Amino acid sequence: MRRPPLRRVGLMLLAVVVTTLGMTTPAHAADTGTISGKITYKNQPVEAAFVYASTETGAGGYAVTDANGDYQILNLQPDVYRVQVSAAGHPTQYAPATIGYYDAAMHAVSAGANTVVDDALVPIGTISGRLVNNIGGGMANAMIATHDPETEEHSGGSASTDAQGYYSMVVPEGTHVVSFTIGNSRQYVPGARDFADAQAVAVAADQTVTVNETARPNGSAAGTVLDAAGQRVGYGLEIIFAGTEDNPEYVYTSAYTDENGDYRLDGLPPGPYRAMFRLDSGSIMLYPHTLVESAAQTVTIAENAVTDVDDQLLGTGTVKGRFTIGDEGAAGVEAIARPVGGYGAAWTNADEDGYYQIDEVFTGSYTVSFRDLEGTFEQWATGKLTEETANVFPVAAGGTTTVNDSLLPTGTVKIKAKDSTTGAAVKGFTAGVYNGYGQAEGDTLTLTGIPVGTHPISLSAAGYASVDGQVSATVGAGGQTVTVMVSLTRVRALTGTIVDRVTGAAVRDVCVIAVRATRFSLPDGCGDSTDENGNYRITYLPESGPVKIFVAPYEEAVHGAQWVGATGGTGDQRQAVTVTPAAQGWTTGPAIRMDRRAPLKGTVTSETGQPITWGSVGMYTPHPGLGGGFGDVQLDEDGKYATSFFGPYSWPLVFSAIDHAMQWSGGKPDRFSATPVKLTAGTPTTYDYNMKVGRRISGTITMPEGAEDLTDHYLVAGDVTTNDYVAVTSVRAGGRYTLRVLGPVQMTVGLEGPWPTYQAVKFTGKLTVGRRDQLVNFCVTSPTTMVICGSKAAIDVPLQPTPPARPVPGTMPTQPVLPGGGGPQPR
């Protein structure tokens, strides 16, 4: 069984050509290889660009391009390399033409051979502007960065403000969120503490976009720290300020005292903090003058103010001793002193004879634990396996507390499992005892190094109820081996086999998913997959009712996806066979025959004539909390897509893109009315599609007074007929939302909270979308319901004007200004 998170499969039109060519090398380089190539921008060579080749371990080399844009990196050990390009006036990128580190291609280098990696610098624009405070003064030394609006990852732009608050940075063309970091506080344009409330900035190639921003007010903390004797501590004590759960912005930052014991932290977002004082040993004292959390107080930082936080340190003592394994000292073992009811820990490593000494431990009560660097054991003094049962040791000012311990004797646990219904052995289960964990190769799992005592067993196997402590293993002294048989109870499941339609051979590593007969909704992952004999056992089932079975390749690269039909695969859920699992135990499902993959490719365009900046093609609309779905493939920068996911059947395809409605092949609003695309095994089918913008549904969602805000909430619309998701949008500041929908369609509408609850508030009626844009306001009236409200509710408004055409070549692009700070612009 596998449950990997789903990922959108990004297809990229490679701007890099990678070939391996034989070459003559000097004798001393016969065991190494070379990477060479050309770097260009707008089809012109780029001189003096730094090109780095590195493996996952960091090994590699670099070169600088010449006047022709050529480079050559010599003496590379055979391996796979990521190629990075840094050129003046351009963001750092990776071949092939991508900003993302993890989106880079890996290039194989062989001994005595040359690998060619050409790359073209990505098109760039500029973001510039000014950061000011609340009275219009420029703010110096703030850090500016750009982020991907979807992933929050760095998207290539970075700069810092000058003495007057001005900045300028080159960025890849595309859409970016801009952040400003001032001291320990980060905000996003326009003036948002939370990334979800940021507004993205669109930058075209060779365009300059002005983004001004006003810094949100922050506060500061400052103080003096005295030692236990009442003297200033001097240089180097670490003071930590950590935002509490009640702080609207998470902050964890620190400063160090100067030679006079003074410190200061600026740029702290207003709110409550926990103040801590950490010694070099790792021992932490909480403000004010306490070791335990229950006696600590929070510090409230106010806007535009300096909060004084002075304190005096507790006294310190020493914890020392020896840890042995048998009669021998345990060299290098970690000794850790944790305060009872406090934060952090003081620790050190034992010497070669197992002796350790931890100096500078704040006075108080501690538990002491020992663990090896490989993680094979962790034990609490004296001779205990949990912190809850550990002895407590006092540490006094100026005193020494001695804590010795020896590793408990260990034994071996062998675990077997059987089916409680048939008594047959269960193979391939996973199980854990104490700190031992593994998967059975056959019907037995052997775990060594288990300490003496009684330990609960955790065990899981596909098709059976999990065991979590209901069965235990007792290990006695003397290194004995104990065997435990675990009886497993079958859970509700569908079982069967999958074979190749032509050869009859078993097909392994394909996902087998049962979905409600009335709705196509997949889990966040593969769910269940076939074993080496092609057997499947579907345990992720709806609580009741009939299901239909969907089969999709996961680690298998030969066969295509299908709905399981009566005589073979189909691309239409309505033609799939219906299976009703029994209320308990295993039900025999259909024998599934898979066909070879049917390649599909095409180009997606927009009726506006503008390029589609981001989009995807798939076979269903997943829940917004689950990311991409099976068969979902991203469009490349030219709107092209290609996939070999599908089987050779007729499939309805769904198209999604920014600023466009979700829509189905043939320009239809739903899956059932879509024009199916017929695919053929082994022969590529081309399906080009021109997307419609759709109707704009917008408005405001009003919450009851005192209710939580709508940060991280989604407005989700579903098709009444197909139960597919029609549109999904995040709710912006002030409860504002915008949906794009292809009409005519009748929709259900719901407001869903963030993961992991997805708590839903449903609109009690149905919303009909025709051929006009609509303004629809909602009011939440209870924890589970909302209604249309407001004087402008459900009023048709004129369609939005057609977006302007592309600028005529050679004309000056406009410079949009985002809302934010004022102040004069640099000349």
Image (spheres, rainbow, N blue to C red):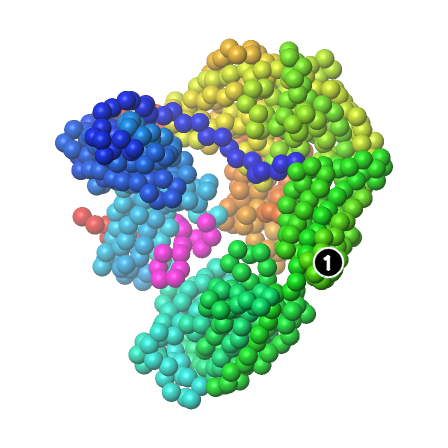
Which quarter of the picture shows residue 4? Answer: top right
* Residue found farthest to the left: 67
Rendered residue at 66%/68% (across/down): 384
Instruction: Give the residue at the far right of this rendering.
Output: 421
Which residue lies at the image location 50% right of the left edge and 46% below the top edge?
A: 732
Relative height, residue 451 to residue 172 (above, below) = below
Q: Could you say which is closer to the camera, residue 541 or residue 663? A: 541
Residue 671 highlighted magenta (yes or no): no
Q: Does the stretch in magenta take in 186? A: yes
Q: Quadrant of the N terminus?
A: top right
Amino acid type of the residue tagged 1 in the rendering? Val
Q: Position of residue 708 (x, y in %)?
A: 59, 55
Residue occupied by mark 1:
475
Quadrant of res 101: top left
The residue depicted at 62 percent of the width and 43 percent of the height is 751
Magenta residue span: 181-195
Left or right: 577 in relation to 680: right
What is the secondary structure assignment of the residue under circle 1? strand
**How far across and down, in percent of the image, does residue 114 sit?**
28, 27
Front one among 752 and 570: 570
Looking at the image, residue 81 sits to the left or right of residue 545; the answer is left
